Image (tube, rainbow, N blue to C red):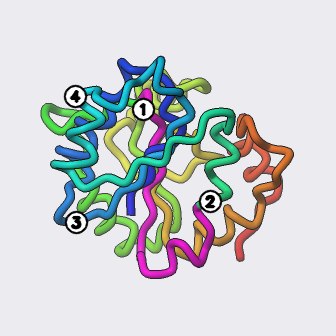
Amino acid sequence: MVVFNAIGKRNNLALVEHARRNIFKPDTFDCIAFMFSKEDRIPDNNTFLISLQNELGCSISRTPGLMWGDFLQFISPTFVSNYDYVALVLDDVFIPNQGPHAVDVNKMIENMKQYDIQVMSPGLVGDTWNTLSNASLRGLDRCIAEVDFIETYMQLFTRDAWTCYFKMLHYTGSVGWWYDLTYKKTNVLT
């Protein structure tokens, strides 16, 4: 299952549509997208929104007034119990499907299985903590590496890892910022 979280800007729908069409393809991943924008910002007749719903089979849940952290609470362990993997993708992330930094989610899943990885993210250009830049300086930008924490731009969770992450969520975390750092501090393994 892929979850596109907190769609708020019309321009970001092109990124979501690209990711759905090229990375999290309809024949492999079920899809839900949470949107907090009202119809005056993203109208129902938006070309990308229509494509996501009608052509690419993505369920769109429009709920103005809610925030990124609120939507995470809708992705309960029961909701994802039929999926081995849950991908969480923010609406403003471009995920390349071509070139030297192309993301192949099926290869990510293979690596997760092979190396017993519970949560994985591709390296991201422009991340808040410069993880990819720091890895590149050390010659690790094309490696699978353990990191202290993963920023929530695009993450792939096993079902069990999602259940663990979900247990950390709290209704007071509506904005959702800093869940990645909080998760690091809790060092929860089960």
Which is closer to the viewer, label 4 or label 3?
4
Mark 1 vs 2: CB contact within 8 A: no
Secondary element at tag 2? loop
Which is closer to the viewer, label 3 or label 2?
2
- The kind of residue tagged 3 is Thr
Q: Residues within 10 Å of mark 3 (few under 14, many from 20)?
A: few
Residue 110, picture quadrant: bottom left
Image position of 79 (left or right of 44): right
Q: Residue furthest right?
A: 172
Which residue matches tag 3?
28
Q: Earlier in the sequence, mark 4 or mark 3?
A: 3
Q: Earlier in the sequence, mark 2 or mark 4?
A: 4
Which residue matches tag 4?
47
Q: Which residues are magenta?
A: 75-92
Magenta span dominant secondary structure: loop
Image position of 1 (left or right of 74): left
Secondary element at tag 4? helix
- The kind of residue tagged 4 is Thr
Say which residue appears at 43% left-offset and 27% top-offset: 92
Image position of 117 (left or right of 2): right
Determine the CA span between mark 3 and mark 1. 23 Å
Which is closer to the viewer, label 4 or label 1?
4
Which residue matches tag 2?
74
Which residue matches tag 1?
124
Q: Residues within 10 Å of mark 2 (few under 14, many from 20)?
A: few
Where is the C terminus found, in terms of image quarters?
bottom right
Determine the CA span between mark 2 and mark 4. 26 Å
- The kind of residue tagged 1 is Leu
List x then y, in percent, for residue 72. Answer: 63, 52
Where is the N terminus found, in terms of image quarters?
bottom left
- The kind of residue tagged 2 is Phe
